[in-house]
Amino acid sequence: SPAGAQAEKAPLHVAAAADLMPVLPTLVRNFTKKTGIPVRISWGASGEEAQAIRHRAPYDLFLSADRSFPERLAAGGYLRKESLRTYAKGILVLWISKATLDRAHEQPGVGLLSRGFIRRIALANPRLAPYGLAAVACLRSKKLWPALRRKAVYGNSLAQVAQYLRTGAAQAGFLSESQSRVLERSVKGHSVSLSPSCAPYLSQEMGIVTRSGNQREARAFEDYLLGASAQRYLMKHGYH
Amino acid sequence: MIHSALSVTVALSFLTATILSVLSLPLAGWIVFSRSSWTTLGESILTLTLVLPPAVLGYLLLVAFSPDSLPGSLMARLLGHPLPFSFAGLLLASLIYSLPFAVQPVAQSFRQIPLRTLEMARILGAPPFTVFRKIVVPMSLPGLATGWVLGFAHTVGEFGVVMMVGGNIPGETRTLSLKAYDDLLSMKAHGARDSVLLLLLFSSVSLVALNLLRRKGVDSHASDAP
Amino acid sequence: MIHSALSVTVALSFLTATILSVLSLPLAGWIVFSRSSWTTLGESILTLTLVLPPAVLGYLLLVAFSPDSLPGSLMARLLGHPLPFSFAGLLLASLIYSLPFAVQPVAQSFRQIPLRTLEMARILGAPPFTVFRKIVVPMSLPGLATGWVLGFAHTVGEFGVVMMVGGNIPGETRTLSLKAYDDLLSMKAHGARDSVLLLLLFSSVSLVALNLLRRKGVDSHASDAP
Amino acid sequence: MRPMPLEVDLVLPGRGAALSGRRVVFTLSRDSGILGLCGPSGSGKTTLLRVMAGLCPKASGVVRVDGVSWLDSNLGTDLPLERRPVAYLPQGVSLFPHMNVRENLVFASRLAESAGFGKRPPSAGRLSGFRSILRGGSLPGWAQEVVELFGVSRLLDKRSGELSGGQAARIALARCFLRSARLYLLDEPFAGVDPEGRAGLGRILAGLLARRKAMALLVTHTPDELCPLAFGMVRLLPEEDGDESPGLPVQQGQMSGTGAKGLLERSGRWE
Amino acid sequence: MRPMPLEVDLVLPGRGAALSGRRVVFTLSRDSGILGLCGPSGSGKTTLLRVMAGLCPKASGVVRVDGVSWLDSNLGTDLPLERRPVAYLPQGVSLFPHMNVRENLVFASRLAESAGFGKRPPSAGRLSGFRSILRGGSLPGWAQEVVELFGVSRLLDKRSGELSGGQAARIALARCFLRSARLYLLDEPFAGVDPEGRAGLGRILAGLLARRKAMALLVTHTPDELCPLAFGMVRLLPEEDGDESPGLPVQQGQMSGTGAKGLLERSGRWE
Ligand SMILES: Nc1ncnc2c1ncn2[C@@H]1O[C@H](COP(=O)(O)OP(=O)(O)OP(=O)(O)O)[C@@H](O)[C@H]1O
Ligand SMILES: Nc1ncnc2c1ncn2[C@@H]1O[C@H](COP(=O)(O)OP(=O)(O)OP(=O)(O)O)[C@@H](O)[C@H]1O
Ligand SMILES: [Mg+2]
Ligand SMILES: [Mg+2]
């Protein structure tokens, strides 16, 4: 039977950026339901996974949270160049907690960040994550960065930035739209979209590992992610 | 950049190891000499911070330190600023994280003091605290040294907790270990090499110096054969 | 899911702590009893794995284990598969990472054996290895126990190295500590709570049991006052 | 009526199979001086001393000094070590290995001073704490006298591990006498000391005890040597060997003159 | 000409200020038996024994046994401990604290057997390794005999910390004699043993030495007691006290009869 043949083969192994945790599991389940291809996910920071792929990690497909890691890997021959695709475009948002907003009596926006009751602003480490870089660029363009720099704290990933906001350690922070929606399930807050007004949409790319033995399945998953239903699902969860 | 990360690391590690060495004395004393049956539980709790993944521990500490929580708000009032993302918060987190490494070797030293020696001090009329101060502690210097080294080295390499509680702020809470991680993952080969080398250099110099010192101390004490 | 992460963690921690306890005997023996002046350097190198941030250490191990490198290719031929991203690689990395925690307490125990006792064994005609086996090791059981506990607990909580070398592969190299971190980041409040609780439960049960055992052992030995 | 200086009626605690149910009874009517204690190996001399010092929690019977009960298992009295005016010199090496000789002696003399012993300098008071820091590790004058009496002042700077057996024994004895006590319990204090030394130490002990009006119970394996100094001798009977039956007759500590009958009379009541 | 059984001409190593440059000279012409060694505390008895056992690397001079140089600092000879047929009983407690009495004795007897001592069972050979595992911690027959000779077989199951002082001394002595040696160096072997015990042990020692054709150098502080057993006595002079000057005349170990002149003659050449 085809199911038996599938079972003998190793499942499709996806290395995914931890930022995809809110959306990817559902997509994977649907994919498996549709194609019968089992999928296994390893989560991690994009940078860590990029290093792993360079060192022959047994992954088939890499879903990065940005485009620079996949592109650099492809340039090194670790990913198939022709398989690089943008599967989603992220939206940079500024998230401010409700408790803070209540003290402001003002519309939420970047301008609020200079106020004294915002003691800490969380953003992803600009050296590791494009969302962090984009946030800094946005603040720079408004000439706010030199003053706000002292308030900045850095997380290694968007997920960590969300933890700072969730625990109240930081009162405002820069997230992706999708992360901010998850965050709002546990803390009350308000988010202001900054893409494309202050920052560009942030392309998230994927690529197939050159050494993978599951080329066909990986291709199928790429196709599925780019398909209409998956894209609709992503759109609904905060991607552009 | 590297200089400030180095000085944060040096300050954090020295302070953590030294404060922990002081704290380990009463804690290990309680674990080893108390007749209470709580000590087994106490010792296990001490070891628990070890088994939590650092990032998870860091998260829990972040929750506990948050100005919304009772301990966090008390500390914030005391310090004049909230604990998270400050050097003080980082120090406190490091203390909690590295505690078992400093306490266990000291406890082990305490256990190896012969009962005969403790008894002799009591016979001479020494009250418990004097026995502790004049007999137990001086006879446990090797354990204290081991505890200091483990606490120091462990703090230098600490990553998850430091990242979570400190917020990676340059010049304040960014340690060499965070910097090395950034450099490594951002695939700037040169930067990573520099900070890893600096980390290794700094650590090896201090460790070799310390081991030499300790060895000298041990040699002078162990020559008890007549 | 939790079950497989638990079993990976249990297997990894028990194996690491136990293998390290065995390895710590010759290593600590060399550090403490060798007259070579290399021992200070050796001891410092041993402690160095402590000061490297886990992720950086993991990266270095990844490079060393890679089938392109000499040691990596030898090991790959031996095992039939490359080391990185396999349980065997994870185990090897954990052994390297936790080595100092197992060795230091044992070395400390060795140092506290009176020279008189060692001399007496030599006088009775015991060759060095017999002295080691029959005197040094049995008198160092408390240190071995401390080393085992520290090695075990440290491996349970290990994160950066496991992530880097193991690749977080469910059922194979994903440990409870990685799972707890994932759950935490994904903000599935329940999931994180479950795995943190499981981690704590598992660790506390093993630590309490171990401390009880050890305490019994110590009590029976320490009653040396006449 | 003045109470007896020392009354002992003990059943020694069984230690494993050994000693179980052994009874020791003796009484002293003299106020100060040395009472010898002898008996074969394993007869319970050390055990008896430990019970009297308060180091053996499982003993039953009575130990009464100057009418004060230190131990009375009928009444449930069992003074803790700290509250018995007793000094105990254990058998074997007992110097602290991490201190040199001077530190060992300073440690003991500080503790004795804090218990009110020793002539403090007249200017004691507010400044004394500060002074004691300034003097650092130096012996107070009264302690220096005791140390010179025992002839060990030349050894003050040796480390404990560097002493010969006899030197260590002398220092331990001196350290014991830095403590003021009503009753000194000395377990083979002269072991490892040469014959001239033993004789000299015996005279020193006798003199000190007379001056301090204190008693000593002194374990020895050379009772003949002690005769000129001790006013009596308690002799413990050998351990019963072979199969013990629970119905053994109670054995009593016996006091004998060991070749010096006259001593027995001076030793007061004896049962 | 048969070589001398024992020739000693040593300058003891200075230990701190003590003992510096002290010379000890004596020679034995008898093939077996006990030679006493006495002298006041700190006169270097223990140091001398350690030098002869090979435990003191800084000694200079000559130690020659049956014509074989163990130490000859002129020729640069210094046999390591392992290659000297010597057994050494140190002063003070020396049992292993983590073993009970039986384990202490089994440990020593196994080592003696592997050095070729003791009557192995006739079936020894291929199976003996396996057998020795099966017997586990039991004493071989020949060792059992030695242990019974010293009268400690009742104590085999005690832990080292549970022994009385005299019991521990006896066991240490028995353990020392589980080793076969040409020269036994015994540092106060009877310390802590009762008078009857000392006399008995002395006879046992004399008998064993005669049977094994071995010599013993025995440190004692009761030389009179040893007289009936020893054929001679080396007496070390007291340590010079006070200010030492480097030009002090060399002091020599002296041999004296301590009240038993006749022994001196039997003791052979003496200088
Ligand atoms: N901690 C202990 N546990 C069990 N038995 C013990 C302990 N200490 C001593 N014993 C036993 O109790 C008995 C009496 O011992 P004790 O030390 O009182 O004898 P002693 O008269 O002092 O002998 P010695 O003259 O040899 O010192 C001995 O048989 C000894 O083995
Ligand atoms: N490890 C050492 N370091 C320095 N000096 C030492 C050491 N061991 C012994 N001495 C000193 O050497 C001298 C001789 O000591 P030794 O132990 O040989 O004397 P002894 O004759 O055995 O005396 P005793 O009868 O008291 O045992 C003493 O003054 C002693 O203090
Ligand atoms: Mg005794
Ligand atoms: Mg000596």
Image (tube, coloured by chain):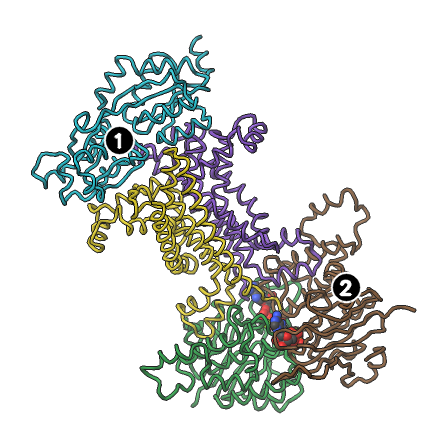
Chain colours: A cyan, B yellow, C purple, D green, E brown
Judge whether D263 appears above or below B12 on screen: below
Q: Residue at x 78, y 56 (%)?
A: E117
Q: Chain of mark 2?
A: E
Pointer 1 residue: A131
Q: Quadrant of residue E118?
A: bottom right
Q: Residue at x 45, y 46 (%)?
A: B200
The quarter of the image holding the C terminus of chain C is bottom right
Please state the horizontal and vertical placement of residue E229, each as a whole percent of the image: 79, 76
From this view, report whether residue B193 is shown above or below residue B143.
above
Return the residue found at the far left: A105
Chain on which label 1 sits:
A
Q: Nearer the viewer, residue C196 or E64?
A: E64
Q: Which quarter shows the N terminus of chain C?
A: top left
In this view, the residue in front, E143 or C86, is C86
Q: Secondary structure at mark 1?
A: helix
In the rendered image, residue C56, in percent from the top left (x then y), is placed at: 42, 39
**Disc number for residue E77:** 2
Instruction: Quadrant for residue A218, please give it.
Output: top left
Q: Position of residue C126 (x, y in %)?
A: 69, 55
- Which disc, if any, is residue C49? none
Identify the residue shown where x is 82% and y is 79%. E270
Disc 1 to disc 2, C-alpha distance: 78 Å
